[in-house]
Amino acid sequence: MDFCPLCNGVETAAVECPNCQATLEDQGKITDYFDDYSAYMDIDMMKMFDGNRKSLEDHECLHYFYCTNCQHEETRTISDSADGFS
Ligand SMILES: [Zn+2]
Ligand SMILES: [Zn+2]
């Protein structure tokens, strides 16, 4: 990961919930949730959680989003080269 605008607090995510159109809350990068397993899982396995190995090569950051309105949850890859989150 070279630079993630969300992890660095430069931007806030504005991801719309596909179910209820509320704004999903950024719960942080997904790898934070695997700290307990980091000794056993290498970064390749973490990236495969998203089913997208390419995200590793593209220096993307996986974030976990949660809808407080309908409990929808999803992961998004955050790329420093991406323009927006749509
Ligand atoms: Zn990030
Ligand atoms: Zn929702």
Image (cartoon, rainbow, N blue to C red):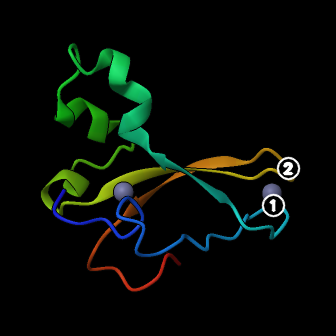
Identify the residue at the far bottom of this view.
Answer: 83
Corner quadrant of residue 18: bottom right
**Ligand 2 lies in quarter:** bottom right
Q: Residue 46: horizontal and vertical position, in percent?
A: 29, 34
> Who's the residue at 46% across and 75% down the image?
11
Which amino acid does the dot numbered 1 rest on?
Answer: Asn
Disc 2 marks which amino acid?
Answer: Cys
Q: Is residue 14 left or right of residue 30?
A: right
Q: Quadrant of the N terminus?
A: bottom left
Q: Position of residue 59 (x, y in %)?
A: 19, 60
Residue that mark 2 sits on: 70
Residue, x 68% and y 60% (percent of image)? 24
Q: Residues within 10 Å of mark 2 (few under 14, many from 20)?
A: few
State the residue at coordinates (34%, 80%): 82
Q: Do the residues bearing badges 1 and 2 touch, measured as CB atoms within 8 Å?
A: yes
Q: Is mark 1 within 8 Å of ligand 2?
A: yes
Q: CA distance from mark 1 to mark 2?
A: 8 Å
Q: Residue at x 13, y 57 (%)?
A: 57
Q: Secondary structure at mark 1?
A: loop
**Closer-to-camera residue (4/8):** 8
Q: Is residue 12 left or right of residue 4?
A: right
Instruction: Count how many numbered circles sit on residues in the image.
Output: 2
Q: Which residue is mark 1?
A: 19
Residue 61's place in the image compared with 8, above or below, is above
Nearer the N terminus, badge 1 or badge 2?
1
Residue 3 appears left or right of 62: left
